[in-house]
Amino acid sequence: MPSKVIAVAFLLAGTCLLAQPEKTAWDVLKPGLVDTNPLNRRQAVTATGAVGLDPQAVQLVEAALKDNDSLIRATAAAELGEMKSRQSFPALKAALDDPSGEVGFAAAKALWDMGDKTGRGFLEDVVAGQQEATDAGVKGALHRADRLRHDPKAMAVLGAKEASGALLGPFNIGVIAAEQLFKNTRVAARMQALNLLAEECDPQTFKVLEAAATGDDNWAEKAAAAKALGRCGNPDAIPKLEVNLSDSNAAVRFMSAAAIIRLSRKPDAAVSASQTR
């Protein structure tokens, strides 16, 4: 058999081997987006956003803008902003008219962060306290925040629950309840450290993140580490992350699935797959 044919066959085999973990990961992640538990759906939306600027991921997060739970719609809007999905401008602009104020606020912020000032009027109304909503939206949240202005902890919990339904900022993992972070400062510190370490994608960081994503006892830290590993790891981590797809905690399963999908699409993925299998 000519060497060129052998090389092509080898590459095709490597591609098939690589495709299976990604398919399995999507099979874990997609059901979460239609789970009957709203918390699981929010976690799945956030994990899908962690896949990055991928056409399928963008489409699924945009679909969540029509969820019947306002916090999920707000989370979807926030995630589209985090993904820098400029193709989602029409969907985000439509979300400015959402009957729930927190959804409109999240959409306005996402657009603003991507350089589109369409939601300026909405933001100005929020500042002026004039934005009305049919439920406990931004206006109600601002009134409560005013009463709680001397309690930073309560305000942070309020913001995480009602403004977006997700923790953004330095943690940016979306699946962790604010109450847990405030109850356990060690968890909060480790999560922040994992997020910062992900900015240094060197071999030592990879080892630290891999160990935390697959061996940590705390589900919050495992989910945070899985997301960080998806950002800066390499495809060699896929087999270990696959173990998390059967984890009892939905956040760990979904974020690990998202990391596998993201890592499967890195340029060196085919080479890594052929070397490790």
Image (cartoon, helix red, strand yellow):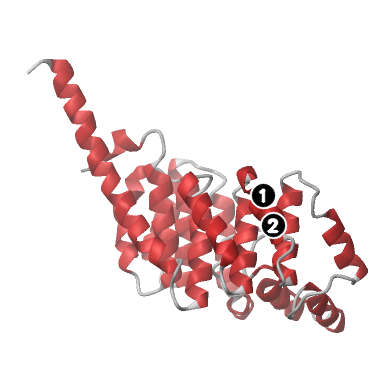
Nearer to the camera, 251 or 26 = 26
- Residues at marks 2 and 1 touching, judged by CB atoms closer than 8 Å: yes
146 with respect to 80 (left or right):
right
Mark yes or no: residue 45 visible.
yes
Q: Tell me residue 167's x, y (percent).
A: 63, 66
For label 1, count other residues whose C-alpha is less than 10 Å away and answer few (under 14), some (14-19) or many (20+): few
Nearer to the camera, 56 or 194 = 56
Which residue is at a point 29% across and 51% down the rendered structure image? 21
**In the image, is residue 238 above or below residue 104?**
above
Which residue is at a point 48% across and 65% down the rendered structure image? 44
Mark number, residue 90: 1
Q: Tell me residue 46's x, y (percent).
A: 53, 61
Nearer to the camera, 96 or 123 = 96
Which residue is at a point 30% across and 37% down the rendered structure image? 272
Residue type of the residue flagged with mark 2: Ala
Residue lying farthest left?
1
- Is label 1 in a helix, a strand or a loop? helix
Residue type of the residue flagged with mark 1: Pro
- Is label 2 in a helix, a strand or a loop? helix
Q: CA distance from mark 2 to mark 1?
A: 6 Å
Which quadrant would residue 273 be assigned to in this image?
Answer: top left
240 with respect to 29 (left or right):
left
Quarter of the picture holding the N terminus: top left
Q: Tell me residue 172's x, y (percent).
A: 60, 59
193 with respect to 203 (left or right):
right
Mark yes or no: residue 212 visible.
no
Nearer to the camera, 19 or 223 = 19
Which residue is at a point 75% across and 63% down the rendered structure image? 105
Residue labelled with disc 2 = 94
